[in-house]
Image (cartoon, rainbow, N blue to C red):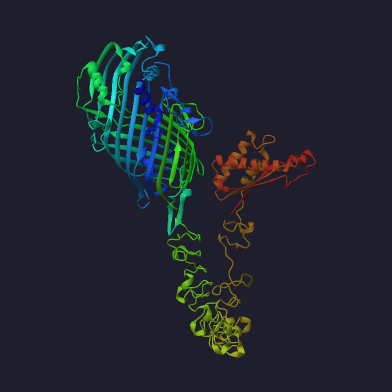
C-alpha cells in the first residue's frame, strides 16, 4: 500500500512537471495582442481584429500540477547550488503533507496543441476564422485531507494517528484523456468612435479516449492497529473505467476509443475603449480614413468568456467497474494492491466484499466549463498591465475534469516579434506564484511557477509551456517616398509623387505628371502638353509675343484692347477704338479731327471752329448756342431779342415770360396771398387778411389789449418755481375766452428771469413758467397748436439787475397776440 500511494501521489503532484492544468494554459499570454491562435483556448473573441493576418501553430505544449494537501522539497530535483539538476531515486523523504483533516484537492493536466490556424478577412478585416486541434489529459483528486495523505504514504502504519477518526467527504479521484477539433468564427460587433466591441464563438467536436474514477460520498476510517495497518472503515466506493482497458497489459488500448463524441462551444466578448481613435486613421492609395490594422488602439479593454459549454462525454463501463459497500471494524489497509492494476485491485476487493457489479452500464465525464474575465490596460507604447480571473463552473459532486480558481496579474512588454511576460498568480489552493514567459518570433517558452527553479523549498505547484508557430503580422503599407501611395501600388517608388498619379511626380503642380509634361518645371495646361499660357489667351508662352498679356492669334498673342485692328503696343489710344490713320485714336464724329483735338468729338464740325458745328451760322458754336437753329446775339447766348409779356425783361432772363412783372422780381408779379391788398413782400401777416394801415395785419381790439395787460400784470408765481398763484387765475381765464373767440389769434409766450443763481437753473425756470401759462390756457379750451413758447432766462433783462426793483421787473412772462 505504501508503494501504491507513493507512486500515485508522485504521479499526481510531483512527477508531472511536464504537464499542465488548462486553468493555466498560456496564462501569461492572456490579454496579449500577439497571442494569435492561442487566444481561442480562453476567449475566441480575441482573434477578431488581431494583429495577425494569419497565425499557424505547428505544435505547442503546456503542463502543470497544483495541490494544497502536499508539498515536495525542491532538493528532490536539485542539488544545492543554482540549477544543479539531480533527480533522486527515492521520493518519500522529500514528501510532506498537511497535518489537518481539512478537505483538500489536487489536479494535473497535459495538453498538446496540434496544427491550428487563424486568419482575418473582410474589406475592413472585421471577420476572423480559426481551426484548432487539441489533446487533453486530466487527473483530479478531491476530498482528501493531509492526515489521510500521511496515512496513505505510511501504508496506514502511523502511530501518531492511531484512534483518530478520519472522514473524507465527497472523495473523488478521476482521470480522463480526450481530444478536440474546433472552428472559431468572430466579427466586429460595434466600431463607433471611442467604443469597440467584438465577439466570437468556437464550436468543438470533442471525443473521449479513456477515463477512470474512484469516488465516494464519504469515507470514514480509524486506525486501530498502526503496527499492522489495521483500520475500521465504512464507505460506499464506486470504481469506473472505460471499456478500452486491457487487463493483460494494465494500460488503455491505443487502438480503441472508449468514449463517445460530444459537441461543445466557447463564447467570448471583448470591449475596447479607444479615446484616441482619430490617431489611427490614415490616407493611402487614394482612400481616406483607413484604419491602422497593425497597431493596438485601446486605452483599456475588458473581456469575458465561457469555455467548454456542452454535454458531458459518455463512456461505457469496463469489466473492472464496481460499486462496493464496505463496513469493517478491522480491515488490513496495508494489503491493498496498487489501484493502477485494476484487475488485481478489484479481485482483492471482490474477495473481501463480493462482486456486486455496477448499477449503471455507462457513466458521464463532464467537461471543464469555466468563466474567464480579463482586463488589460495600455500604459505606454509596448507596456501593458493585465488582470485575469478564471472561475471553474463544474459540479464537483459529479465525475468531471475541473480546475481551481485562478487569479493573475501580468505586467508585460510586447511588440509584434518579441514579448516578456511576468505573471503573478494566486490560486484556489492558496498558493502565490510568479512566472516568466518569453516570446521571440516563432518560439514561445515560459512558466507560471518559476519559484521552484530559483530556490523555493516546498513546492505545491509547477508548470511549463512552450510552442512553435508561424505568425504573419499585419503590416502598415510601406511608403518609402512618403507620398501616400504604398510601394505596392506606387508607379514611381523612388520619387515622391502625387496621389492622383499613383505616386508619380507633378513638379509644377499643373495636373500633368512629369513624364507626360513637356514643361515639367513650369505649370501649364493639358492642351499644350503641360506648357504654360500665362495670359490664358490660347497661345502658349513659347509662341506668344506678349506672354503676360492676353492677345489674339493674328497679332502673335499681343492684345488689341479696343478691338480697332491696331495692337496696343502701336496704339496711341489702346483703350478706345480708333482708326489706323490716327494711330489707333478715334474720330467719333468723322470730321477728320481726332477726338483728343476735337472740341466737339461727338458733333462734326469744321477745323476752324475746333471741330464744332455752327448750324445757324451766327458765329456761336452749337454747344454754346441756346438757340442753335436761330441766329442770335452773343450777349443773348446766340438767341434773338424777345419780350413776350412786354414787361421790359427779355424772355431769356424772364422768370415769368408770359406774365408781366417788375424787373427786380425777374419779370414776375409780386403775390398777395391773403388778398388784403398788401403784397406779400410788404405784408407782415401774409396769410392773414389785415388792415393795410397796419402792414397787412389785423388790428387788435382795445378790449383784448386790456385783457392781455391785465393777465400780464396779475400773473404771479410762487417763489423759485413755476406754480401759478390763484390770484392770476381770473385774468388768465379771461384771456382764454378771448383766444377762443378769436381763432386767428396766436399767443406768443416768452419767459424771463433775473440773473440771480445759475444760468441753467434760470433757463429752466423761465421755460417751465412759460409752459405753465400755456398749459393753463390749454386746460381752459385753447388748442395747443395756437401757442409759440420761448424761454430766455436772464438773457433779455428790461431793468437793472443790480437793484431789487430791477430784478422784480426782469422776472416776467410776456404774452403777445400774433398772426400767421
Q: Does residue 166 appear to the left or right of 687 in the view shown?
A: left
Q: Position of residue 651 (x, y in %)?
A: 57, 77
Q: Residue at x 62, y 39 (%)?
A: 731
Nearest the viewer among 274 and 217 is 217
In the picture shown, does residue 248 fall above or below 543? Answer: above
Q: Quadrant of residue 326?
A: top left
Q: Residue furthest front?
A: 89
Q: Does residue 647 appear to the left or right of 280 in the view shown?
A: right
Q: Position of residue 471 (x, y in %)?
A: 41, 48
Q: Position of residue 287 (x, y in %)?
A: 42, 57
Nearest the viewer among 752 and 464 is 464
Nearest the viewer among 341 and 569 is 341
The answer to whether residue 72 shows anywhere in this view is yes
Q: Does residue 145 appear to the left or right of 318 in the view shown?
A: right
In the picture shown, does residue 785 fall above or below 270? Answer: below
Nearest the viewer among 13 and 84 is 84
In the picture shown, does residue 20 fall above or below 680? Answer: above
Q: Quadrant of residue 139?
A: top left
Q: Residue at x 64, y 44 (%)?
A: 708
In the picture shown, does residue 441 fall above or below 519? Answer: above
Q: Does residue 669 appear to the left or right of 442 in the view shown?
A: right
Q: Residue furthest right?
A: 802
Amino acid at each position: 500500500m505504501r508503494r501504491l500511494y507513493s507512486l500515485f501521489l508522485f504521479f499526481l503532484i510531483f512527477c508531472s512537471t511536464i504537464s499542465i492544468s488548462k486553468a493555466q494554459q498560456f496564462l501569461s499570454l492572456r490579454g496579449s495582442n500577439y497571442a494569435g491562435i492561442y487566444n481561442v483556448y480562453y476567449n475566441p473573441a480575441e482573434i477578431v481584429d488581431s494583429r495577425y493576418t494569419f497565425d499557424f501553430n505547428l505544435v505547442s505544449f503546456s503542463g502543470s500540477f497544483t495541490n494544497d494537501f502536499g508539498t515536495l522539497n525542491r532538493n528532490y530535483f536539485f542539488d544545492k547550488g543554482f540549477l544543479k539538476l539531480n533527480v533522486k531515486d527515492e521520493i518519500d523523504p522529500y514528501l510532506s503533507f498537511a497535518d489537518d483533516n481539512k478537505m483538500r484537492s489536487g489536479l494535473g493536466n497535459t495538453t498538446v496543441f496540434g496544427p491550428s490556424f487563424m486568419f482575418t478577412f473582410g474589406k475592413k478585416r472585421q471577420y476572423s476564422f480559426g481551426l484548432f486541434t487539441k489533446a487533453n489529459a486530466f487527473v483530479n483528486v478531491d476530498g482528501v485531507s493531509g492526515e489521510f495523505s500521511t496515512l496513505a504514504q505510511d501504508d496506514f502504519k502511523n502511530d501518531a494517528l492511531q484512534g483518530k477518526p478520519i472522514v473524507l467527504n465527497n472523495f473523488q479521484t478521476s482521470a480522463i484523456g480526450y481530444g478536440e477539433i474546433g472552428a472559431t468564427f468572430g466579427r466586429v460587433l460595434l466600431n463607433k468612435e471611442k467604443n469597440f466591441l467584438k465577439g466570437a464563438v468556437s464550436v468543438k467536436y470533442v471525443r473521449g479516449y479513456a477515463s477512470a474514477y474512484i469516488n465516494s460520498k464519504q469515507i470514514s476510517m480509524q486506525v486501530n492497529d498502526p503496527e499492522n495497518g489495521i483500520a475500521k472503515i465504512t464507505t460506499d466506493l464506486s470504481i469506473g473505467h472505460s471499456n478500452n482497458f486491457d487487463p493483460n497489459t494494465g494500460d488503455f488500448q491505443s487502438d480503441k476509443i472508449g468514449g463517445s463524441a460530444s459537441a461543445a462551444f466557447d463564447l467570448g466578448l471583448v470591449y475596447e475603449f479607444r479615446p484616441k481613435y482619430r490617431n489611427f486613421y490614415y490616407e493611402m492609395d487614394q482612400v481616406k480614413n483607413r484604419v491602422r490594422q497593425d497597431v493596438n488602439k485601446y486605452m483599456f479593454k475588458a473581456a469575458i468568456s465561457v469555455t467548454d459549454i456542452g454535454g458531458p462525454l459518455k463512456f461505457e463501463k469496463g469489466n473492472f467497474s464496481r460499486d462496493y459497500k464496505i463496513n469493517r471494524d478491522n480491515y488490513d489497509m496495508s494489503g491493498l494492491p496498487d489501484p493502477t492494476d485494476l484487475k488485481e485491485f478489484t479481485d482483492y476487493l471482490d474477495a473481501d466484499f463480493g462482486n456486486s457489479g455496477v448499477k449503471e452500464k455507462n457513466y458521464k465525464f463532464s467537461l471543464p466549463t469555466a468563466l474567464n474575465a480579463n482586463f488589460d490596460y495600455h500604459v505606454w507604447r509596448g507596456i501593458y498591465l493585465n488582470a485575469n480571473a478564471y472561475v471553474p463552473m463544474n459540479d464537483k459532486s459529479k465525475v468531471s475534469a475541473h480546475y481551481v480558481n485562478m487569479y493573475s496579474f501580468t505586467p508585460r512588454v510586447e511588440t509584434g516579434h518579441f514579448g516578456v511576460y511576468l505573471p503573478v498568480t494566486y490560486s484556489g489552493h492558496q498558493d502565490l506564484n510568479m512566472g516568466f514567459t518569453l516570446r521571440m518570433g516563432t518560439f514561445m517558452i515560459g512558466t507560471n511557477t518559476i519559484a521552484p527553479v530559483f530556490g523555493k523549498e516546498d513546492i505545491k505547484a509547477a508548470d511549463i509551456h512552450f510552442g512553435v508557430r508561424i505568425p504573419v503580422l499585419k503590416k502598415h503599407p510601406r511608403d518609402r517616398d512618403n507620398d501616400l501611395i504604398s510601394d505596392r501600388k506606387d508607379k514611381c517608388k523612388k520619387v515622391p509623387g502625387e496621389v492622383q498619379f499613383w505616386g508619380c511626380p507633378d513638379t509644377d503642380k499643373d495636373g500633368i505628371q512629369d513624364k507626360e509634361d513637356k514643361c515639367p518645371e513650369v505649370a501649364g495646361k493639358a492642351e499644350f502638353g503641360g506648357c504654360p499660357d500665362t495670359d490664358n489667351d490660347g497661345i502658349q508662352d513659347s509662341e506668344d509675343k506678349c506672354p503676360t498679356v492676353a492677345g489674339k492669334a493674328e497679332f502673335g498673342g499681343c492684345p488689341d484692347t479696343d478691338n480697332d485692328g491696331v495692337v496696343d503696343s502701336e496704339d496711341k489710344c489702346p483703350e478706345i477704338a480708333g482708326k489706323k490713320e490716327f494711330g489707333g485714336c478715334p474720330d467719333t464724329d468723322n470730321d477728320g479731327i481726332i477726338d483728343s483735338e476735337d472740341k466737339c468729338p461727338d458733333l462734326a464740325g469744321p477745323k476752324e471752329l475746333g471741330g464744332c458745328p455752327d448750324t445757324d451760322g451766327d458765329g456761336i458754336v452749337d454747344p454754346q448756342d441756346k438757340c442753335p437753329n436761330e441766329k442770335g446775339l452773343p450777349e443773348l447766348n446766340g438767341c434773338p431779342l424777345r419780350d413776350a409779356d412786354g414787361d421790359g425783361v427779355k424772355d431769356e432772363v424772364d422768370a415769368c415770360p408770359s406774365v408781366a412783372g417788375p424787373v427786380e422780381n425777374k419779370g414776375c408779379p409780386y403775390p398777395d396771398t391773403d388778398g388784403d391788398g398788401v403784397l406779400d413782400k410788404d405784408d407782415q401777416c401774409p396769410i392773414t387778411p389785415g388792415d393795410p394801415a397796419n402792414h397787412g395785419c389785423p388790428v387788435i381790439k382795445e378790449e383784448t389789449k386790456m385783457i392781455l395787460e391785465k393777465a400780464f400784470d396779475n400773473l404771479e408765481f410762487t417763489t423759485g418755481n413755476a406754480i401759478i398763484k390763484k390770484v392770476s387765475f381770473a385774468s388768465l381765464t379771461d384771456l382764454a375766452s378771448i383766444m377762443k373767440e378769436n381763432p386767428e389769434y396766436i399767443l406768443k409766450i416768452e419767459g424771463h428771469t433775473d440773473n440771480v443763481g445759475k444760468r441753467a437753473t434760470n433757463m429752466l425756470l423761465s421755460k417751465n413758467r412759460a409752459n405753465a401759462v400755456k398749459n393753463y390756457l390749454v386746460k381752459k379750451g385753447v388748442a395747443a397748436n395756437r401757442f409759440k413758447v420761448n424761454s430766455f432766462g436772464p438773457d433779455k433783462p428790461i431793468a437793472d439787475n443790480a437793484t431789487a426793483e430791477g430784478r422784480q421787473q426782469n422776472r416776467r412772462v410776456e404774452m403777445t397776440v400774433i398772426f400767421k
